[in-house]
Image: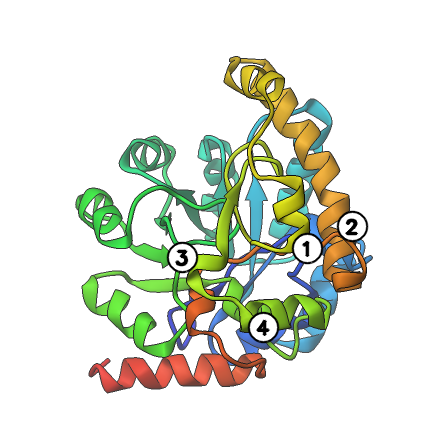
């Protein structure tokens, strides 16, 4: 579907999806996904110019992530601009999240662009299927960032019958784990944390070393990043700050309308904190997003080496 050599996606990550990392994964035979805010706000590229810069580094397929939750009119205008530019620049793959992707599919399908949607359970998968998506990124309970609540096998069992390709996202930190999820029935896998600990990622070395040093039990869920649980590394700063929303915030997060505003407030605060932490490391408030795949990550290596090792594991499974 994506015209790639290895069914391996470098997931979109704020603030860690720098152009060089996206290009390196695609060039190695997988596919890198652009996170628009990361490209522009963190790494300083005009969105169109950033896509063209990535194109100067690789002519292999890349993708763009669009978070389509209708949080504000201004934000949605920006999302529509990102979509327009992505289509104009010939991006062949879109990954949507947190909303109804039907309007994205309506624009993308006539251009021959493939659309996958992030899902955490069958309910959201059915809604996205009605919207015409081509496949699903199944975010499980071991993922970094916005983790799901279900294990990978249960997601496969629940969403597989919908008849679309499924990508396993979460907890994959070794080539053997990659081969295992493909053997289970997934069409491929999406990695985030593993690619932060790569040579091409421009995140601060403190962030990368925190991933290398962390074990599975060091990953905790915080409600204070975006208003919904986010997987992060338990650091002294996180222990001091706590991971639970306060009583007023919890009440607002339960409201039909107020939850969107509360999530936006948390996100606006966290966008700045995450950016500073990724750039300044332990010299700043160390909020490091990561998933339970840290258990299998023991070194910072080039992205191409990661893709090659994972591809070799598939070949060992007879693929």
Would you identify the image quadrant in which residue 158 lies?
A: top left
Determine which residue is flagged by label 4.
197
What separation in Å lies between label 4 and label 2 (alpha carbons)?
21 Å
Pair 1/2: label in front: 1
Determine which residue is flagged by label 3.
170
Q: Examine the rendering and report whether any part of residue 203 can be seen.
A: yes
What separation in Å lies between label 2 and label 3 (alpha carbons)?
26 Å
Q: Which mark is residue 245?
A: none
Do callouts 1 and 2 mark residues in contact (Cβ within 8 Å)? yes
Looking at the rendered image, the quarter that the C terminus falls into is bottom left
In percent of width and height, residue 280 lies at: 80, 62
Determine which residue is flagged by label 2.
41
In the rendered image, the vertical position of residue 18 relative to residue 236, given as above or below: below
Earlier in the chain: of badge 2 and badge 3, it is: 2
Which residue is drawn at the image coordinates 74% and 56% (left, top)? Answer: 277
Determine which residue is flagged by label 1.
15
Q: Tag 3's secondary structure?
A: loop
What separation in Å lies between label 4 and label 1 (alpha carbons)?
13 Å
Relative horizontal placement of residue 112, taking residue 201 as reference (left or right): left
């Amino acid at each position: 579907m994506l015209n790639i050599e290895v069914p391996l996606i470098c997931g979109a990550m704020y603030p860690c999806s720098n152009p060089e990392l996206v290009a390196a994964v695609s060039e190695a035979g997988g596919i890198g996904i652009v996170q628009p805010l990361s490209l522009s706000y963190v790494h300083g590229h005009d969105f169109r110019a950033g896509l063209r810069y990535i194109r100067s580094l690789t002519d292999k397929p890349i993708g763009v992530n669009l978070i389509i939750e209708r949080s504000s009119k201004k934000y949605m205008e920006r999302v529509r601009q990102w979509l327009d530019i992505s289509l104009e620049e010939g991006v062949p793959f879109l990954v949507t999240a947190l909303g109804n992707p039907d309007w994205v599919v309506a624009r993308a399908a006539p251009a021959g662009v493939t659309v996958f949607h992030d899902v955490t359970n069958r309910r959201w998968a059915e809604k996205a299927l009605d919207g015409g998506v081509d496949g699903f990124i199944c975010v499980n309970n071991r993922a970094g960032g916005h983790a799901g609540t279900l294990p990978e096998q249960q997601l496969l069992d629940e969403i597989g019958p919908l008849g679309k390709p499924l990508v396993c996202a979460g907890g994959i930190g070794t080539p053997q784990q990659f081969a295992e999820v493909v053997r289970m029935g997934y069409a491929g896998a999406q990695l985030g944390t593993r690619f932060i600990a790569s040579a091409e990622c421009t995140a601060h070395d403190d962030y990368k070393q925190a991933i290398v040093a962390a074990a599975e039990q060091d990953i905790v869920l915080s409600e204070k990043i975006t208003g919904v649980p986010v997987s992060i590394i338990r650091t002294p700063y996180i222990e001091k700050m706590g991971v639970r929303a306060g009583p007023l915030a919890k009440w607002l997060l339960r409201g039909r309308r107020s939850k969107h505003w509360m999530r936006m407030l948390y996100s606006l605060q966290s966008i700045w904190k995450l950016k500073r932490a990724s750039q300044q490391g332990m010299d700043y408030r160390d909020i490091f997003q990561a998933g339970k795949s840290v258990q299998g990550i023991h070194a910072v290596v080039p992205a191409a080496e990661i893709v090659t090792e994972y591809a070799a594991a598939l070949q060992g499974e007879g693929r």
